């Protein structure tokens, strides 16, 4: 059973370009969470999705950021018109259920976005 | 009220010693307190977790101590080994499970031979 797969592992974008980060959850997992980690900081919650639904996007910046988790295929975190401040590691986690007791989530290895 | 404060920011411990990392929280609705271990270039991995109805939980060399009245919890790593060198994050969530975890700022642990 493969773990949470994120790609690409490293992504370099010029200011103003779009960044697309992909997350394939573990097999059997239908809940996905995206986190952002700035250098030397902890992870900050961005968004929580179930298949075809955004459950909680309270941590998402209001502009330029969007996320989806379609019925088929990976979850996508999309950042439009990237700026230098978007440079960070973006982690995806998946779980079989959300918000229930004894529900654990597993993290991918992250995508390191560098905006030049 | 959603913060989880973690200290120290960095820690150097000799091999065989005890590593202690402390965290404090404000939101009394938190009911799940996991600790994560992160190696460079990797994602966080769950190390050990505790719920507030328990004051201590031990798994191998790792122990969480929890003080509900003080809203504090700590991680003790006994007999620290160089392979334990990593960044450790305390975290908290509510709702009984994983959902929307609030992370501390991390402690970079270095265990020297």
Image: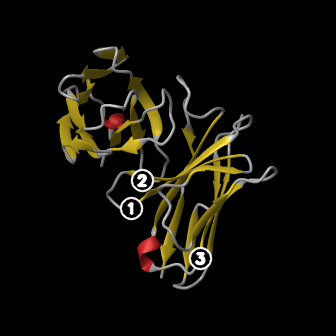
User: In the visual, does A62 lie left or right of B78?
Assistant: right
Q: Nearer the viewer, residue A47 or B49?
A: A47
Q: Label 1, on which residue?
A: A38
Callout 1: chain: A
User: In the visual, does B1 lie left or right of A26?
Assistant: left
Callout 3: chain: A
- Tell me the tag on residue A44: 2
- Tell me the tag on residue A80: 3
Q: Please provide percent x and percent y for residue A77.
A: 62, 62
Q: Which of marks 1 and 3 is nearer the N terminus?
A: 1
Q: Mark 2 or 1, which is nearer the eye?
A: 2
**B77 w.r.t. B60: above or below:** below
Disc 3 is placed on an element classified as loop
User: In the visual, does B101 lie left or right of A1?
Assistant: left
Judge the density around disc 3: few (<14), some (14-19), many (≥20) Cα neighbours within 10 Å: some
Q: Please provide percent x and percent y for residue A92.
A: 57, 50
Q: Distance between the residues labelled 3 and 2?
A: 19 Å
Judge the density around disc 2: few (<14), some (14-19), many (≥20) Cα neighbours within 10 Å: many
Q: Earlier in the sequence, mark 3 or mark 2?
A: 2
Disc 2 is placed on an element classified as strand
Res B113 seen here: no
Q: Distance between the residues labelled 2 and 1?
A: 9 Å
Q: Mark 1 or 3, which is nearer the eye?
A: 3
Say if mark 2 contacts mark 1, CB within 8 Å.
yes
Q: Nearer the viewer, residue A47 or B55?
A: A47
Q: Please provide percent x and percent y for residue B60.
A: 37, 17
**A70 w.r.t. A62: above or below:** above
Q: Which of marks 2 and 1 is nearer the N terminus?
A: 1
Q: Please provide percent x and percent y for residue A58.
A: 49, 55
Residue at horizontal 34%, vertical 41%?
B89
Residue at horizontal 29%, vertical 15%?
B56
């Amino acid at each position: 059973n493969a773990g949470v797969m994120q790609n690409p592992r490293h992504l370099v974008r010029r200011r103003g370009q779009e960044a697309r980060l992909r997350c394939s959850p573990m097999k059997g997992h239908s809940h996905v969470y995206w986190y952002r980690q700035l250098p030397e900081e902890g992870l900050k919650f961005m968004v929580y999705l179930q298949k075809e639904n955004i459950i909680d996007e309270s941590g998402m910046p209001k502009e330029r950021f969007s996320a989806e988790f379609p019925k088929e295929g990976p979850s996508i975190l999309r950042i439009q018109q990237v700026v230098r401040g978007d440079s960070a590691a973006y982690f995806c986690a998946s779980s079989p259920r959300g918000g229930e007791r004894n529900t654990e989530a597993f993290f991918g290895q992250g995508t390191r976005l560098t905006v030049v | 009220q959603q913060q989880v404060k973690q200290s120290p920011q960095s820690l150097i411990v000799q091999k065989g010693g005890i590593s202690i990392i402390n965290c404090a929280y404000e939101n009394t609705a938190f009911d799940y307190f996991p600790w994560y271990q992160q190696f460079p270039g990797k994602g966080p991995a769950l190390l050990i977790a505790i719920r507030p109805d328990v004051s201590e939980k031990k798994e191998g060399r790792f122990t969480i101590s929890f003080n509900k009245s003080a809203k504090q919890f700590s991680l003790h790593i006994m007999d620290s080994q160089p392979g334990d060198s990593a960044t450790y994050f305390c975290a908290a969530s509510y709702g009984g499970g994983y959902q929307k975890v609030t992370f501390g700022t991390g402690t970079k642990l270095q265990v020297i031979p």
